Amino acid sequence: MADSQVPWGVQALSGMVSEPAWKSKPSWYLVSTEDKMIPPDAQRTMSKRAGSKVVEVKGSHAIYVSQPRAVASLIEQAANGSVSTEK
């Protein structure tokens, strides 16, 4: 997992966003229901605020490790512009 997490640049702290993409573009969100880093209720609030299509999956913060098929499925659904609401 450490190999997939790369350091981010300090320049990101001073970056300016004129229009957040989530305000004008469709978005999808995978809620990890067993996440101990970002509480699932906080994830639900953020995804609702962004107007995201939401899928919930039982799994930890590292959902792409514990549930790679669910992550791949959501990516495919987003690429196709649709989403299944199955839990």
Image: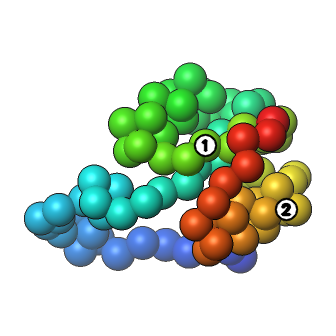
* Residue 82 occupies quadrant: bottom right
Marks 1 and 2, Cα distance to the nearest angstrom?
A: 17 Å
Q: Residue furthest top?
A: 41
Reply above or below: 36 against 27. Answer: above
SS at badge 1: strand
Q: Name the residue carrying label 2.
A: 68
**Image side of residue 42 versus residue 51, left or right:** right
Quadrant position of the N terminus in the picture: bottom right
Quadrant position of the C terminus in the picture: top right
Q: Earlier in the sequence, mark 1 or mark 2?
A: 1
- Give the residue at x 64% y 72%: 80
Q: Amino acid at mark 1?
A: Val
- Does residue 18 appear anywhere in the picture? yes
Q: Residues within 10 Å of mark 2 (few under 14, many from 20)?
A: few
Q: Name the residue carrying label 1.
A: 54
* Residue 2 occupies quadrant: bottom right
- Give the residue at x 34% y 56%: 22
How many labels, in total?
Answer: 2
- Give the residue at x 65% y 47%: 30
